[in-house]
Image (tube, rainbow, N blue to C red):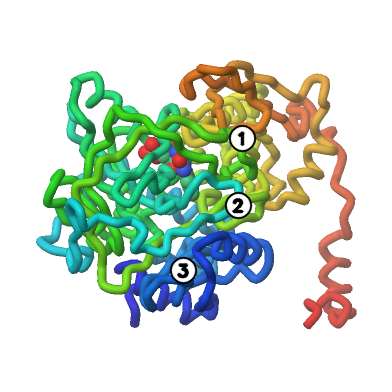
Amino acid sequence: MVEVTKDLRSFIEGIEKIGLLKTVKGADWDLEIGAITDTNSKSNKYTLLFDDVKGYPKGFRVLTGALLDSRRVSTALGLDNAMNNMQLTTAIRDRLRNAASDHEKYKPKVVGSAPVLENTDRGDKIDFFKFPIPKWFKHDGGRYIGTADAVITRDPDIGWVNVGTYRVMVKSKNSLVMLMEASRHGRTHYQKYLEAGKPCPVAISFGHNPGLNLFSANEVPEGVSEYNFLGAVRQKPVEVFNGPVTGLPIPADSEIAIEGYITEEKADEGPLGEFMGYYAGGKMLNPVIKIEAVYYRNEPILLGTCAGKPPYDYSYFRCPIRAALIWNALDSSGISGVKGVWCHEEGYSRAFTTVSIKQSFGGQAVMAGHIASQSRPGAVAGRYTVVVDDDIDPSNLNDVVWAMCSRNDPATGIDIINNTMGTPLDPISKHVEGKDLLEYTSSRAVIYAVKPFEKIIKKTFPDVVRPDEETDKKVREKFADLFTAKK
Ligand SMILES: Cc1cc2nc3c(=O)[nH]c(=O)nc-3n(C[C@H](O)[C@H](O)[C@H](O)COP(=O)(O)O)c2cc1C
C-alpha cells in the first residue's frame, strides 16, 4: 500500500488510486496552465499533473488541484477520506488540540540526505527559467514559482522555525521577490534581522506533500513550527534535512528548493490574482531574495495553485483547518457550548465563518461571535461571522442563510467592529500613495442568527415546520422511489 503522506509522488499515486488524477500533456506555461487550473476548479475538480509543458523537457512537471476537496485534504493528512466537512474539522481539531503543548513529541525528524539534492545549481548555473513556472493569468506581473510553497525562516532571538506560504515571483534568472503581509511570522523574523543589520536566511520548498500547505497557509499560533502541527495531525513527525547554506530545516520530500537571504533591497512584485478573487493589491515593492543555491530532484514537480472567483483552486483547503483552529481558539478562551465551526469556501475560508452554539445563558452568542471574529485564524482578512444555534449545521450554507433570514433582527442583531486588521489585497480598501501595507484596517460584522435567549428559556420560540418523525419515516418507506437519489 502507498504511504500517501510520504512525499508528493506518493500523494499523487494515492489520488490516482481514488480516480481523481488527470495528466495533461502539451499545455503552455504561459497562461494555459492557469486557465486549465481555474476552469477545472469550477467543473470536474481533478488533480492535474502537467507534463510535456511547451518548451520544457518531459518530466519537468507542475501539479495543481492538489487539495480541491475533503477527500484530498484528508488524504494529505493520512486521515479517512470518506469524512464530510464537519467530521474532518472535528478530527483535525481533536488532533490539533494538544499540538502546541505536546509539540516536542511532533518536532520534525532530521534526516541526513534528501532526493532534492540530486541536482544543485550555484552561481552562474542558477536559472529559474529551466523550470516550467506558470504565468497564471494575463494580468499577472510575471511568472510565479511560489504559490503553494513553504517559506522557512528562523526567529533570530528564540530560534523557533516558521513555515509560511508567501507568493514568490521570478525577478530574473537568478533572483526572486516575495510578498509577506502584515502579521506574518516570516515577516516578523525578517524585520528582526533587518533591525540587527543582517540579511535574513531563508529556505523555500516549491514542491512537497501538500499536507504542509494545510498549515503553512493557515494562521497557526506563533512560537511552534508548522512542521510540529502537521506532525501532530498525522501523529508522525515530518522529515526534514538541514540546508547546507543556512542550516534551515527543508522538507525531506522537497522537489525543488532554494536557500538564500531575504535582503533589504526591494523590487517590483505583482500583480498576481489574489485570494479574494481580484487584482486589488496591484504592483508592490517587496523584498528581493538573493539566491545561494537551487536544489531539485530529477524530473521535479512544481506544486502550484492560482486564485479566482470562488470556487477556485485553493478556496477549499483552508476551510477545515481554519475552522478547527478557530474552534480551538474559542475553547481556549473559555467559550462554552460551541458545537461546530465552519469557514465557507464562498468566503475563500476567511470572510464567512459560522459558529454553532448551544445557548445556555444570555450574551453567549456575543462572546462566541467576537472571539471567533478576532482570534488570529479568524481575524486575518475576515468579514462576516455568523453565530447560529446547534440545530443548524454550520457547514450547510442553505441552513445558515435560512437562520440569518429567520432568526436575525438586523437592527439589533448585528455588531460592527471597526478598525480591525486589514489588507491592501481587499478590493474595497483605500489605497493612498505611500501607504505601508502594515497600515491597512477594515471592519467586521458579527451576525447573531440565533433564537432570542429569552424565548429559549420561556420555551416560546416557535417550532420548525416539518413532517412529524413517524409520518416522515412512513412515507419514505412507502414511496421510496420518490426519495432515492436520481441516477
Ligand atoms: C496560495 C496562497 C498564497 C498566499 N500568498 C501569500 C502572500 O503572498 N503573502 C502573505 O503574506 N500571505 C500569503 N498567503 C497567506 C499566508 O500563507 C497565511 O496568512 C499564513 O498563515 C502565513 O503563515 P504565518 O502565519 O506563519 O506567517 C497565501 C496563502 C495561500 C494559500
- Mark 1 crowdedness (10 Å alpha carbons): few <14, some 14-19, many ≥20: some
Mark 3 highlights which residue? 80
Horizontal side, residue 487 vs residue 131: left or right: right
Tell me which numbered mark, 2 or 1, is placed earlier along the sequence: 2
**Place of residue 285 in the rendered image (x, y in percent of width and height, measured from the top left):** 44, 30
Q: Quadrant of ligand 1?
A: top left
Residue 380, percent from left and from top: 52, 32
The residue wearing badge 2 is 138
Q: Vertically, is 335 above or below 319?
A: above
Q: Which mark is residue 280?
A: 1
Task: Give the secondary structure at mark 2.
Answer: loop
Mark 2 lies within 8 Å of ligand 1 (Cβ measured): no
Which residue is painted at 28% across and 39% down in the image?
A: 224
Alpha-carbon span between mark 3 and mark 1: 38 Å
Residue 355 shows in the view? no
Alpha-carbon distance for marks 2 and 1? 15 Å
Identity of the residue drawn at 63% across and 19% down: 417
Identify residue type, mark 2: Lys
Q: Quadrant of residue 33?
A: bottom right
Q: Quadrant of the N terminus?
A: bottom left
Q: CA distance from mark 3 to mark 2?
A: 39 Å
Closer to the chain start, of discs 3 and 1, is: 3
Taking the image as shown, residue 282 lies to the left or right of residue 42, namely left
Between 459 and 240, the residue placed more toward the observer is: 240
Q: Nearer the viewer, residue 453 or 96?
A: 96
Q: Amino acid at mark 3?
A: Asp
60 versus 340 height, above or below: below
